[in-house]
Amino acid sequence: MEKHTRRVFFDGDAFGYLVRLFNRLNHAFYRNARGDDYICEGCIALIAGEIYEALAAAESFMEQKHELVTQVISYINANLACTPPLEDLAKRFFVSKYYLSHKFKEYTRTSIHKYILMKRINLAKQLLEQGKTPNEACSLCGFSTYSNFYKEFKNQTGMSPKKYTKENIII
C-alpha cells in the first residue's frame, strides 16, 4: 500500500492556539469532571477545523504546482502515438528536461518514459481486444519496432500480444 503524507506547518499564532487547545483537551480528559466530555469534543472539533483549513490551503498550493504535470499528461494522452522526446516535450512547456522529469516523477511516482509506455500498452490491449492484429496495434500505439512493442507488452502483461489476443478477444 502506497503511503501518502502531507506536512502542514503552522505559524506562531496558529501553533500557539493548537498547543492551548491540546493542553485544554489533555486537562479535561484526565480530570474526568462533569461536562468535560463536551469540552473534549469541542477541543477536538476546533483542532480538526484548524488542521482541515491548513490542509485545504496546502492542497490548493499543491494543485497549482500540479498544473504543469496535468498539462503534460493531457498532451501525452492526446498525442500518445507520436509523443515527442523529453527534450522537445520540455521545450513545449518552457521548462528544462530535468525540471520536467523531476516534477513529473514527484507527482506521479513514475518517469515520463514509463508513463508513456504504460499508456501505449493499455491502448494496445484495447486495440487487440477490438480485433486489431499485433502489428497494427504496434504501429497505432507509436512503437518504432515490433520487437520493442513485443518486449514491453510482455513485460507489462506477462504474455505475448498474440496470446493476449487469444485470451481476451470478445466473440
Image (spheres, grey):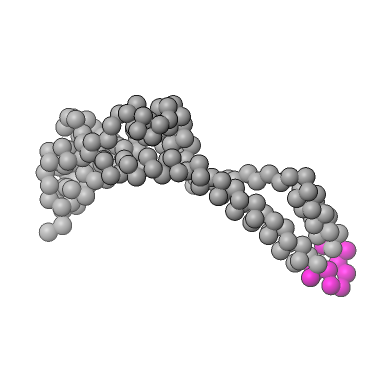
How many numbered marks does the figure carry?
0
> Toward which corner of the image does residue 159 lie, by quadrant?
top left
Residue extending furthest toward the bottom: 34
> Toward which corner of the image does residue 22 lie, by quadrant?
bottom right
Q: Is residue 132 left or right of residue 91?
A: left
Judged by its main secondary structure, the magenta piece is: helix
Which residue corresponds to the image point at 43% horizontal and 36% vertical from the top-left? 104
Closer to us: 52 or 131: 52
Which residue corresponds to the image point at 72% horizontal and 58% vertical from the top-left? 47
Can you give x and y, in whole percent of width and height, for residue 18 in the image? 77, 53
Look at the image and tell me whether residue 86 can be seen: no
Closer to us: 108 or 11: 11
Q: Is residue 60 left or right of residue 120?
A: right
Magenta residues span 29-38
Which residue corresponds to the image point at 43% horizontal and 40% vertical from the top-left? 68
Can you give x and y, in whole percent of width and height, for residue 135 in the image? 12, 38
Which residue corresponds to the image point at 42% horizontal and 40% vertical from the top-left? 69
Position of 128 relative to 113 (above/below): below
Q: Is residue 58 left or right of residue 45?
A: left
Position of 78 relative to 45 (above/below): above
Quarter of the image with the C terminus is: bottom left
Can you give x and y, in whole percent of width and height, for residue 156 in the image? 29, 39
Closer to us: 77 or 151: 77
16 magenta-colored: no
Look at the image and tell me whether residue 67 can be seen: yes
36 magenta-colored: yes
